[in-house]
């Protein structure tokens, strides 16, 4: 696997953002949490993840490169908030009231659970499935689980079991 190189200037911008929000949190919470490790190893369509016990934030290098400052402004405080919530409250609902409080009150950022970045460049092959109300695009992993009869998936709206689209050719 080849790793996308993140320019030093971009890495510095990420760290400035992280340090800004960490300083806000430390001052508000009257603590001195250390700077988390930042890596650029996140893959797939996920923008970033917070690895709580490792005190690490993993960012998606491709989405960062494609979305620049908007990515930094949205994803860095989002993932930092997860780490801070873990330190303050322990294991709680990932986007629950503690996380929302941390985002809004402590960091001063509007809480958003998911990103809206285009994922076309990082999305793998998808398989079309249908229910009564819509079309769903499933990942290779989910498609294979269905094919091996290890899992089944239902539409969140109509609750119908998803069925492969008969028009899709493998």
Image: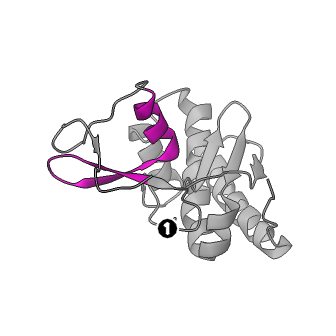
Tell me the colour scheme of the image.
one colour
Q: Quadrant of residue 147?
A: top left
Relative to 17, is 108 on the left or the right? left
x and y, in percent, of residue 150 in the image: 43, 24
In the displayed structure, does residue 114 sit left or right of residue 31?
left
Residue in front for this viewpoint, 44 or 25 = 44
Identified at 38% across, 39% down, the residue is 97
35, above or below 51, in the image: below
Q: Position of residue 65 (x, y in %)?
A: 68, 72
- Which region shows up in magenta? 127-148
The crowding category of the residue bearing disc 1, from other C-alpha atoms within 10 Å (few below 14, some 14 to 19, many at least 20), is some
Q: Is 45 or 145 nearer to us in this picture?
A: 145
- Count up the numbered dots: 1
Reading the image, the residue beneath label 1 is 117
Q: Position of residue 95 (x, y in %)?
A: 43, 42
Is residue 69 part of the magenta span, yes or no?
no
Name the residue at 56% across, 42% down: 82
Whether residue 168 is situated above or below residue 31 in the rendered picture: below
Of residues 75 and 135, which is closer to you in this image? 135
In this picture, residue 150 sits left or right of residue 133? right
Residue visible at 72% across and 65% down in the picture:
14
Relative depth, front residue between 165 and 75 = 165
Q: Secondary structure at mark 1?
A: loop
Single out the residue that lies furthest toward the right.
8
Was residue 137 drawn as part of the magenta stretch in this picture?
yes
Residue 83 percent across, percent down from the top left = 62, 40
């Amino acid at each position: 696997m080849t790793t996308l190189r993140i320019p030093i200037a971009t890495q510095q911008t990420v760290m400035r953002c992280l340090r800004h929000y960490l300083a806000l949190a430390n001052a508000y919470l009257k603590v001195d949490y250390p700077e988390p490790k930042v890596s650029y190893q996140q893959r797939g369509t996920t923008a970033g993840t917070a690895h709580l016990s490792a005190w690490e934030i993993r960012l998606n290098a491709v989405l960062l490169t494609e979305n620049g400052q908007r990515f930094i402004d949205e994803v860095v405080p989002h993932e930092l908030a997860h780490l801070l919530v873990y330190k303050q409250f322990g294991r709680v609902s990932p986007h629950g009231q503690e996380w929302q409080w941390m985002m809004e009150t402590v960091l001063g950022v509007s809480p958003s659970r998911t990103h809206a970045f285009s994922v076309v460049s990082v999305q793998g092959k998808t398989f079309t499935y249908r229910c009564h109300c819509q079309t769903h695009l499933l990942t290779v992993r989910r498609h294979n689980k269905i094919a091996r009869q290890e899992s089944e998936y239902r539409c969140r709206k109509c609750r119908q079991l998803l069925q492969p689209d008969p028009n899709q050719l493998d």
